[in-house]
Image: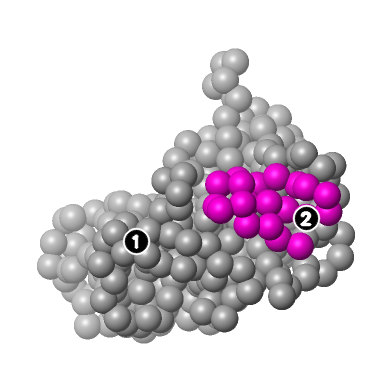
Amino acid sequence: MSEVKLSNVTKSYGSFEVIKGVNLDIRPEEFVVFVGPSGCGKSTLLRMIAGLENITSGDLLIGGERMNDVDPSERGIAMVFQSYALYPHLTVRENMGFALRYAGVAKADIAKQVAETARTLGLEALLDRRPKDLSGGQRQRVAIGRAIVRHPRVFLFDEPLSNLDAELRVHMRIELARLHRQLKTTIIYVTHDQVEAMTLADRIVVLRDGRIEQTGSPLQLYDDPDNQFVAGFIGSPKMNFLPAIVENGSVRLFQHGNVTLPVRLPAQSGTEIIVGIRPEKFTDNGSVALDLKVEFVEYLGHETFVYGSSGSGELLTIATDRKEKMAPGSAYQARFNPSSLLFFQKDGTRLRTEKPVLSVV
């Protein structure tokens, strides 16, 4: 079995704690993506699973076996890095079979496994080339192939697509998704790219300051975040956040024309809160209107992003399908329905409505 279990895992460098009590169960054949801002500990956590970083405390189990002190070569894992790390003097065939040759596998078996993997990755015509004769996407496929031939229990990917251009990243995302379906192997994947996380993951693990903020499917995290950090981190463009105050069973957007929302929250009157709304939740037939001034417009063909400021100068992002030209400085009315909103306490904790949100008449 290829399940991975982390139990209260920590990592410290002297007195500085980098990973702070992580608990996580990764199911066999699951594609799990670690995301988070720079310095959150996602790559460190991956390297701890690989055995490239020691675990300060807690337990790491792979397939039910404790791996804390097991050599990386004996953990049944294969890792693909951001850099391709190919041997420049070896051919594609030799690069892919290097680990097997080092492990003493028979030449005939190496040739068979390399051929099968090359066929899976579409590398058959490139087997006798050297890395300098390959494109970036081809080199990354060779690096992935070198991992596949070992038939690991778990694949670890550390930002493998970040060196590729935009078109190649799209192609490689499709290839990785196809490979996961075909190989039926557990994959743990680190990225800073939200599109990669949302499109590839069965589950996303959001990290901040060495702790897990939330774990769930891409749509769970997008639609139902536990806190303001996750709400703001998942999604591009990011969620809009508006300051508000609870008043007598409703919510008032005090920096946006004192617009009042008929929403009942589990908070005392006078409590300052944060209201969140995603850019695509603005709609022409919304029951609530905010009067904005257009600051900048991005026309992307299939959709348009309007960046508008309120009276307080706060910038909001609105996604719309409007095609007409909007000049900077012109008036813009952003409309939405209260049912589209999320609510957070000042410390970022999610506030959930006590009953269904009403519409404004």
Report the front residue among 58 and 279: 279
Find residue 312 and report its horizontal and vertical position in percent.
46, 44
Report the front residue among 242 and 110: 242
In the picture, measured across the screen, residue 136 lies left or right of residue 349, that is left
Number of numbered discs visible in the structure rendering: 2
Find residue 250 and report its horizontal and vertical position in percent.
78, 55
Residue drawn at (59%, 76%) of the image: 286
Report the front residue among 206 and 125: 206
As drawn, the label of residue 294 is 1
Most common SS among magenta residues: strand
Q: Does residue 298 show up? A: yes
Q: CA distance from mark 1 to mark 2?
A: 29 Å
Magenta highlight on residue 147: no
Find residue 223 and report its horizontal and vertical position in percent.
65, 66
Relative to 40, residue 31 above or below: below
Find residue 196 and report its horizontal and vertical position in percent.
45, 65
Crowd around label 1: few <14 · some 14–19 · many ≥20 (10 Å): many
Residue 19, quarter of the rendered image: top right
Which stretch is magenta? 243-262
Relative to 20, residue 278 above or below: below
Magenta highlight on residue 248: yes
Q: Which residue appears farthest toward the top when viewing the image? A: 15
Residue drawn at (13%, 62%) of the image: 132
Q: Does residue 31 show up? A: no
Could you tell me the amino acid type at mark 1? Val
In the picture, measured across the screen, residue 356 lies left or right of residue 21, that is right
Residue drawn at (58%, 35%) of the image: 209
As drawn, the label of residue 250 is 2
In the picture, measured across the screen, residue 252 lies left or right of residue 159, that is right
Crowd around label 2: few <14 · some 14–19 · many ≥20 (10 Å): some
